[in-house]
Amino acid sequence: MLALLLPAPGVMARDEAEALVAPVRGPSTYSGSDSVQPSATERSPDRAGITVFSAPHYPPTRRDSLIERQFGEDLADPYRWLEADVRSSPEVASWVSQQNAASSAYLAQLPGRDALLGKIRSLFAYERFSLPRKAGGRYFYTRNSGLQNQAVLQVREGLTGEGRVLVDPNRWEADAEGGLRTLDAWVPSPGGHLLALTQQRDGSDWRTIRVVDVASGKMLEDRLEWANDTAIGWVGDAGFLYARYPEPPAGEAYRAQLFDKAIWFHRIGTPQSADIRVFATPEHRDWNHRVTVSSDGRWAVILSSASTLPRRTVQVIPLSRDRLRDWTPVAIAPAMTDDWKFVEGVGDRLWFITNAGAPHYRLVRIDLASGGKRGFTISDVIGEKADTLDAGRIVGNRLILSYLQHGSSYAVVTDLKGNPKRAITVGEIGSASGFGGRPGDPETFYQFSSFNQPPAIFRLDARTGAATPFAVPQLPFNPDDYVVEQRSFPSKDGTKVPMYVVRKRSLAAAGRAAPTLLYGYGGFDVALTPGYSAVRMAWLEAGGVFALANIRGGGEFGRAWYDAGRLANKQNSFDDFIAAGEYLIKEGIAVKGGLAIQGGSNGGMLVAAVINQRPDLFAAANPDVGVMDMLRFDRFTSGRFWVDDYGSPSREADWRVLRAYSPYHNIRPRADYPAILVTTADTDDRVVPAHSFKYVAALQAADLGSRPHLLRVEAQAGHGPGKPVDKVIASGADVLAFLAKWTGLAIE
């Protein structure tokens, strides 16, 4: 199931230039006759003595008298009219246009904005590759020469062959409705003759599946619509399995709740209307399904979930050429009580990672007798350890397993019985990831990345363990000029919480405090690990500090850490984040009055919630694509899947917890709020932009001091993935210029 922030896992995705922490909105393309200008460059000192612009004049916002009684409380919702789709409501479209006019005029006058634009652009201007994927004798990967808006999909005949362009999404024209199409995921057929790819429109979660003939580079006529959070499982070269929803009602594609997802088989060369429905759960219309096919083509593995909680059912379907008309599944884990992650299948043996009886996960093997008709047995291969087992793959005749340790990732190699062979170490704070491949392959590829190191890709010999560089970026800065530390700090209840701190080595050696950007997420069992962002590097190059707090609610330390930050324990996430800010100031890392905070999606809600609770602690904030109305989140698109993290607004006990921290409902009039730049996008169909619209309207209506509270809405964009590079650069400059102005970071 879709996590709030991350692109759904599965087939190999596009080269995503920015890591989790990157602000990802670009300049708005809304236009309108109403132009609202901010106040003149009248200046006033802020509480830290920094000279700043005064707040702009906000556009007028209609306030309705809507009041609903919920669980004994009369609750006003004056801006519910902003929940209407911006594409179908002229009133909402006009309001957004005016908000964008106000914010763009204000941001354009900020000192250092143009310098940041140039700096971020220069930091993007390096050649980068995705992890290669082998099929047949061909190697597939994406390459971005530096400033291309989208990475180009290439193919080599053999590892040392010359790469040729297979798909260049930069040449795609807009669709019939003018939508921006970007390359999302792609997976070659087993023989490497065909390749299926998914196209993303305007950054939304909807996908269109297309098929490419690899030899000619020609796009075939096959066109499959309404895929969403889908993997692609090839069944030989004849066709593939995928997941899709029914076509939504007209005009509701980006708002309506989603039901009746099913797994379908598509045979190459046939229309979508001829696809065969393979698996569905009409008795559970709200369930989500994903399908994977084992590398040997013997098994289709279907994982089903009902929420973002790590609980799934497992069904497997035996595949053979003479049985493609019989899609009868075999239930491996029919009860949705535990998490299951498919690793690989070899013959009648399937390997899974599961938290059944193991909160930090273990590796098991399932032995199917006679294609599953005579039952199966489950045996442990590698038991639970102190570190969390996150992912695994069989390459050659070895298991490669990825573990999480203190917010970083590392990998170990074992034989198929779990006997250790070697560890893959990098000797630095960072993340090693990838390790794709198939049983029998002589090699795998992985990448290493850190806050000061863009992904460098290495080839690992599966037999000897020797690693050789495949693609190492040439950088316009020296990574050794920066120091990456991992510290820990006490939260409100005494819990020790880890945090990464990144800054110039000279700054750390001098012990000087500096303007600091603190990032957090803390939800949905998602682990934040070290990663590179060109936008963040521009902040560091200017002399700022970056900190990432691994607060409770994330997946860095197993199930207990996750549970400690969800449902009735959600306040722990906020306490951890507040304590992180206090620690940075107390330790002389962040200058007092110079602390900015940032988060996206669930992290956007985190930022807005802690502003309400401790507005005095922060100078500036960027809540991005956040969940702001916690009492109505379950009414839109995939919001109902989040109730196991947040609770259900329809249950009184949950409602009271949500009511206590909902950002929209807990703004404190007459408090001195930090400067806030709220960013969202008009085609975000994961966290609908109405959350941000309503929150900003409430901010601007309250007496919160002289600092600006602005909204920046990106057109033809969604929840994060699929941003063209030029939009990432422009949005990064806007956000950093805003945060720099209000924290006192000098941009030269």
Image (cartoon, helix red, strand yellow):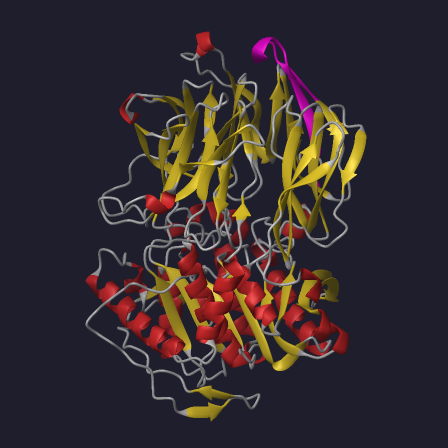
* Residue that appears at 40% across and 57% down: 632
Specify start and end residues of the magenta stretch as a single range: 360-378
* Quadrant housing residue 88: bottom left
| 114, 600: nearer the viewer | 114
* Quadrant housing residue 38: bottom left
Check if residue 141 falls in the magenta segment.
no
Q: Position of residue 6 (x, y in %)?
A: 51, 49
Check if residue 372 falls in the magenta segment.
yes
Residue found at the very far front of the displayed protein:
162
| 664, 680: nearer the viewer | 680
Q: Position of residue 242 (x, y in %)?
A: 42, 29
Q: Is residue 673 above or below residue 11?
A: below
Q: Position of residue 109 (x, y in %)?
A: 39, 80
* Residue that appears at 54% across and 19% down: 299
Q: Is residue 571 found left or right of 726 in the rendered image?
A: right
Q: Is residue 725 above or below residue 621?
A: above
